[in-house]
Amino acid sequence: MADILTSPHAGADVHHGKEIDYIEAKKGIWSWMSTVDHKRLGLMYFWAVVANFIVGGIFALLVRITLLTGNHGDNYFINAETYNRFFTLHGIVMVFLVIIPSVPAALGNFVLPLMLGAKDVAFPRMNLASFWIYIVGWTMAITAICLGMVDTGWTFYTPYSSTTNGPVSLMALAAFTLGFSSIFTGINFIATVHKLRAPGMGWFDMPLFVWSIYSTSLIQVLATPVVGITLVLLTIERAWGIGVFDASKGGDPVLFQHFFWFYSHPAVYIMILPGMAIISEIIPTFSAKTMFGYKAVAYSSVAIALIGFLVWGHHMFPSGQSQLASLVFSFLTFLVAIPSGIKVFNWLATMWRGNIAMDTPMVWAVSFLLLFTIGGLTGIFLGSLSTDIHLHDTYFVVAHFHYVMMGGTITAFLGGVHYWWPKMFGRMYNEGPAKIAAYLYFIGFNVLFLSQFVMGSNGMPRRYYNYLPEFQPWHIASTVGSWIIAAGLFLALGNLLASLRKPKDAPDNPWKGTTLEWQTQSPPIEHNFHDQPVLHRAPYDYRTPVSVDREIH
Amino acid sequence: MQQQFDASKLGMWLFLATEILLFGVLFVGFGLSQGRWPEEFKQAHHHLDRVLGAFNTVVLLFSSFTMVMAVNSASRSKRKATINYLIVTILCAIAFLVVKYFEYSHKIHEGLLPGQYFTYLASTDPMAKGNSVFFGFYFMMTGLHGFHIFAGVVVLCLLLKETIKGKYNAAYYTPVDLVGLYWHIVDLIWIYLFPLLYLIG
Amino acid sequence: MQATHHDSHHHQHHGEHAHHPHDGFKQYLAVLGALLVLTMITVGASYLDFGAANIVIAVLIATVKASLVALFFMHLKDDNPVNAMILVSCFLFLGLLLTFCLLDIDTRVDESPTGKTPISAQGPPSLGREQTSTDAAPKPRPGWIDTHGGGGHGDGSSAAPAPAGQPQHAPAH
């Protein structure tokens, strides 16, 4: 550790043994509700995300069960209208309540300041406010669900959304509120990265996780207000019919789509960049090798964030958008492939001739590489103007974005959870079940969504309650896949929870990581580090042998 | 301390960025609709009183000046001057809102509320739609801006309270500075709103 | 307003050190004066008819005013350039949004069987405004879609949920 850190009491730390960690530093429910400790807030986000993930997952399972048959009688136990609500709620819960906060707000809050060697984020109280805003938004969304559900799809497209019944306004305002929470987190992280890096840590000494989260935060700050005001306009349209999006009153419904996707396409990168962030940590650590092309990976995060703003029109090819605009958007869409490709190749190059240890986080990371690559490459079909006209609004699209959003972000999130679990809770989980869970998830995922690629390219439209008999085998395969995934996730969660019953046995640095969060005890003390860490070498430097003598056990 | 101040300022600027984008979307929507209904927008904007609009502009610009002087005084530990400047700023903001109230009630009286409430022109009138869209944007934009002024008044009052208590001095006046930035951005947005709505249409 | 005299004194003492917290009053007053003059100019210009140039003039003047506010009142002149970058990038992103929306709206073509004429040459359907317009030839207008966006779904999205309950046929290939 001496070559990473110098601190006056570096030697003394070894003799400390475990000190009181952040979880036990204060007692009582109020100490959690009013905490400004980024680690505690990270944990609270984490449990909220897990709970919401279960809710969203149940909706997904219900959608798949409905689709076991395409010829529902009148008395099928889920009717068409309920089905519409199920997929809408699945989308809204997963996008706004799970994926967007999953990595940045939950893991990012926990890890980012530790990685920078900081005591906390730049604005701890704003961090707390952001969490409670998230809870308020969550409450509004749940209330909307209880009040009779929303059937617009997560995209709230006008004119349907401005005329349909149901608590659409409340749901839109919930998304607006959640946007605020996300903005505050973004502001906080940007300021933290700018101002609170440890002494000696230049921009290119930051772990790549930080680079990606930083890029994500930039998008959050620049794009979220746009969708915020758009949803407010939708709400006002519903309440008072001012007609900005209503063609019969002189407005333009397609304008809504422009405004919506100006945020929501970059939001796709809000979702995937943090996933990439985690992978950029796991792969060098478990390959015990320096990150290949560090600067290229760092810049590619920023490039993805910026190019992400130039491509939103590819969601609108058949919407009546002009052909010229579609052509330009289609061309620009291909540009995203460049930085994404840079990342994938650099991860592979990092693994090449590395000393690869297939521990659970690495299994998740490799799953990510496979799934994300499929997701990314099928994106090219959809970005191409001509093929998209055929594939638009089919199951091909559904499969594509699930490969990216779930196969990418959720897979990476689960990898990250397994990676940082010892740091967060101070306990090692059981490797065997954890790996089985990861394999089950991987198999189930492909069974579930590969079949949807086939259906989609054969013309099965998305969001339909009924379908032709020829699609039934694929739908059944898809539904079975959803059960395999559910089993895998259930096993993973049970395994992690089971570890919490054990005494705290995790060493400070179980994976021999080189970033700063592994240089403090597991779980960290309330103020993260005993002494301000000073950085002396680049991240992922495995050439200098790491002394891991700070491990207590 | 300086680092804290810098971080707060950076955070505030990022927040202001979100504010600008929030309004910006409305500006973009307004611009696009103006391109679609040029004649109607021209007709509709004559309903706005440019004298009142100009008066409000002057009021806001002046309040920006007093605000920057409040920051300036706070940074030199001049408590009394800070208090005076803050009071003038608050009074300007209230004056702005009062004028806005009269403008609004006049328009509502004329039946210029947008969409389904638009009764100024018969719905069969070919100009009705474009006029209604203009007022849709007018009420959205000035309403959102008015809300920001109102929020500014609340924050300024809190700031005034703390200043009277003597919380701020040359060593620590971050909140005054940050509220100042907020107030200027509200002014800056009006600088664009006024000509586009009142003068060009 | 006792502070005012003080401020001007300090200003003279410290000369050009604009970033110094001691001076300011005179400079700020000058900025206010400039802003008021510009306001008068923009109001005055609006009484004259420059055609389409009116809006350009108004936006230009507004931008000058906004720059004055940002540079002097918001201290960007002497502040960390990162903050100025944030402000500028906001405007760049709004420009982006506007540009791409215009690119779409100004180049839309009617794909309906009635013809491949640019929508902008037809004017919005069912309006009848062109007849009452004083222009002899209909002015080219951006082609806004005036139908309900039935076909308008983005990927990752779809406007109206599927008309449930009826068996659906796969689209022809």
Image (tube, coloured by chain):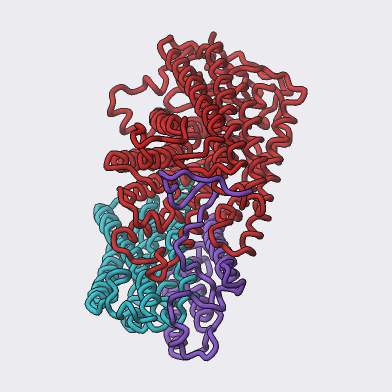
Q: Which hue belongs to chain A?
A: red
From the viewer's perspective, is residue A313 above or below residue A366? below
From the viewer's perspective, is residue B16 above or below residue B63? above
Pinpoint residue C76: horizontal percent, then vertical percent. Answer: 51, 62
Along the viewing direction, whichever of A472 and B11 lies nearer the viewer: A472
Along the viewing direction, whichever of A310 and A241 lies nearer the viewer: A241
Q: Tell me the residue at 31%/33% (across/down).
A: A34
Pinpoint residue B80: horizontal percent, then vertical percent. Answer: 28, 62
Along the viewing direction, whichever of A552 and A490 lies nearer the viewer: A490
- Would you say residue A67 is visible in this rendering? yes
From the viewer's perspective, is residue A332 above or below residue C110? above
Q: Tell me the residue at 36%/71% (across/down).
A: B138
Q: Is residue C10 left or right of residue B114?
A: right
Pinpoint residue A420: horizontal percent, then vertical percent. Answer: 52, 23
Pinpoint residue C14: horizontal percent, then vertical percent. Answer: 49, 67
Q: Tell me the residue at 65%/30% (across/down).
A: A370
Q: Is residue C27 left or right of residue B92?
A: right
Viewport quadrant of the N terminus of chain A: top right
Q: Which hue belongs to chain B?
A: cyan
Q: Is residue A178 left or right of residue A207?
A: left
Q: Which hue belongs to chain C?
A: purple
Q: How many marks?
A: 0
Along the viewing direction, whichever of A395 and A40 lies nearer the viewer: A395
